[in-house]
Amino acid sequence: MILGEELKEDAQEEFGWKLVHGDVFRPPRKGMFLSVLVGNGAQLFVMTLITLVFACLGFLSPANRGSLMTCALVLYVCLGTPAGYVSARIYKTFGGEKWKSNVLLTAFFCPGVVFGVFFLLNLVLWAKSSSAAVPFSTLIALLALWFGISVPLTFVGAYFGFRKRPIEHPTRTNQIPRQIPDQSMYTRPIPGIIMGGVLPFGCIFIQLFFILNSIWSHQTYYMFGFLFLVFIILIITCSEATILLCYFHLCAEDYHWWWRSFLTSGFTAIYFFFYCIHFFFTKLEMSGFVNTLLYFGYTGIIVFLFFITTGCIGFFACFWFVSKIYSVVKVD
């Protein structure tokens, strides 16, 4: 009886997720870019969390429409250190050595994309002599905050991140990569990524209507407590969906989970974008090229930031899960 149980245990170790223990922590391709996205995502995540806490405690008045954005902007600028630290730590764990490129990309990629799109949209408003255009002095002030505070803090965080030892994995990586067997339709990367965003989006899409309505229909948003609860639910669903799909892929002996964990939960942003398109055509009465351009331009910025934030959540959830399950595997 005991011999039979031992044979069953040996047989279980010959297939499934235990079989890829020597490859599961192999650094991914484009590891620098992934670490940059994760670092920026960590910065956005902490900013969102603190902003919502302040709003729930009553520090941000719903009647003052600019207070929430001002708080978020100041927090983002001051949270450059976590972005640099996380990006540097992940990149060093991947075995990266181009630390200067990593720090510069972390400091300039995400803010640069957002500021570039915002500046182009503002040029359109200037050309139309619109009163909604942001003054040039305000843009200079934003650049001063970016280069004077955010960038130096990112360098400080990266300095401490690179001084730390790489994160130790519970299993060693083999020198020769293991061949991945043929995958079924449901364990291939693209179907899994598409399915991964369904559950998180299902938890937030009702709240999205009120948020978009307050932004584009000039209505006051009061439900910060409920929004904070929805954000917590979003964190949980992103983590659970990504971990579940990651486990299925590992059981199918596919160990390429680094990028997939980020993209799986990040795909929630694609459903968010589709909902914004639906909202534009069914709820808003906008006409003209400029109004349409502004709507989709600002929506693109929001979706981009949402993609990085949710992707970061899925990445860390999966990283914790994979490290946990392989820490209990007995490797000869």
Image (spheres, rainbow, N blue to C red):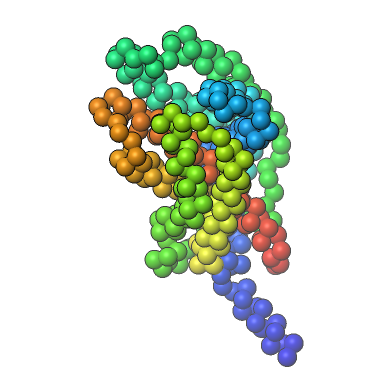
Q: Residue at x 56, y 35 (%)?
A: 222
In terms of image quadrants, where is residue 135?
A: top left
- Which quadrant, please, contains the N terminus? bottom right
252 or 83: which is nearer to us?
A: 83
Q: Residue at x 61, y 62 (%)?
A: 21
Camera sees residue 63: yes
Camera sees residue 90: no
Location of residue 24 with respect to 213 vertically, above or below: below
At which x and y percent is residue 174?
59, 58
At which x and y percent is residue 252?
50, 67
Q: Residue at x 62, y 40 (%)?
A: 225
In terms of image quadrants, where is residue 297?
A: top left
Identify the residue at the far top of this view.
137
40 or 238: which is nearer to us?
A: 238
Location of residue 10 with respect to 286 vertically, above or below: below
At which x and y percent is residue 319?
61, 51
- Which quadrant, please, contains the C terminus? bottom right
Identify the residue at the far left of this view.
288
Location of residue 151 with respect to 45 vertically, above or below: above
